[in-house]
Image (tube, rainbow, N blue to C red):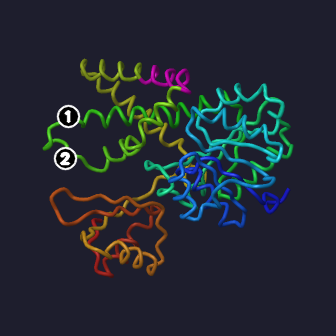
Amino acid sequence: MSATELRSVLVVGTGLIGASVGLALRARGVEVYLRDVDAAVLAEAAERGAGLPGGAHGPVDLAVVAVPPQRVADVVRSLLDDDRVRAVTDVASVKTPIAAAVAPHPRASVYVGGHPMAGREVSGPAGARADLFRGRSWVLCPGENTPSDGEPVELVTQLALLVGATPIRMGAADHDAAVALVSHAPHLVSALVAGRLRDAPAPEVRLAGGGVADITRVAASDPALWREILAANATAVTGVLSALRDDLDVAIGALRGGDLDGVERLLRDGVTGRGRLPGKHGSPHAEYAGVPVVLADRPGQLGRLFADVGAAGINVEDVRIEHVPGEPVGLVELSVRPGTEEHVIAALRDRGWTVHG
């Protein structure tokens, strides 16, 4: 099947993920219809250009269910009742309960569980982006009775490819164990670290820099949504948290006992584990050199910096922006390939930038 054969898609649920799916597919020429129980959210997604509101009036190739987790199974079953829908998928981050609920349906073989490994700490169609899935994994979890080379799997595969994602097939239980390790438990740990800041004295919090901001970034996500996600994957998440608790007990014992070698072993395990994370576009992990550039906190400075970076022919692998507490300046750290940082520093200094070498 070619990508052009996925011609029409019904998106049910037009929040961040649903609206982003619509934006990405419409950019590739796919006809997208939108449905949502919240008229205001539906209108906003349509206004953003994610699709046509009101749902499809005829057959559609694929329905994408992007509703809150507790409603996914019911919505999937209702779509399976409509034989005008050729295939159904969803974007929920926990697959096993949905697969079990859908399995008895007579048309369960046209359902393919899905999960794009992408998101933002903001919610709603206002945060939707057509490039949200680009370079990210999109997991497909076909049911036991769904042919691995059949039309439903192919349609969902084409969905992932059209939005710029990399399709990966996994069993539902394996998927849930994986996301507990790389997403769900880390989210809860991030929230716990951020929670320590809630009642901390203001002078202490003002000392926070980029490190704590990185660790706590996802803690800003919707707690009500994450309550549902964690509840749906409680068994797998509890297993990861139990292992973390054991590590914390070891760390506490080592610090109290002055066992610095034990502390260093834990830190080295962290370095090794981080090194296994994939790099850009799923490539092997790579460490980059950081080039900190001082940026005045006024309009147009960031655009001027990026223009100068481009003019100098510099390939930036990543960017981090950090405000300096109490000062009208910030630091923009440009991540570049090791060995190129001296060229980057010289090129930017030649253009008038203050760069910390």
Judge whether residue 140 can be spotted in this image. yes
Count the marks: 2
**Crowd rating for badge 2 (residues with CA inside 10 Å; few <14, some 14–19, many 20+):** few
Quadrant of the drawing holding the C terminus: bottom left
Quick check: is 99 in the magenta stretch? no
Q: Can you tell which of label 2 and label 1 is closer to the viewer?
A: 1
> Residue 213 location in percent, x, y?
32, 47
Residue sitting at x 71%, y 41%: 140
Distance, label 2 to label 1, CA atoms, is: 15 Å
The answer to whether 11 appears left or right of 86 in the picture is left
Q: Circle 2 sits in a helix, a strand or a loop, which is it?
A: loop
Quick check: is 239 in the magenta stretch? yes
Instruction: Inspect the image, locate mark 1, and give the three-letter code of the amino acid beneath it.
Output: Asp
* Magenta residue span: 232-244
Q: Quadrant of residue 249?
A: top left
> Residue 196 location in percent, x, y?
26, 33
Q: Relative to residue 116, is residue 133 depicted above or below?
A: below
Q: Relative to residue 242, is residue 184 depicted above or below?
A: below
Q: Which residue is mark 2?
A: 207
Q: Which residue is mark 1?
A: 199
Instruction: Inspect the image, locate mark 2, and give the three-letter code of the amino acid beneath it.
Output: Leu
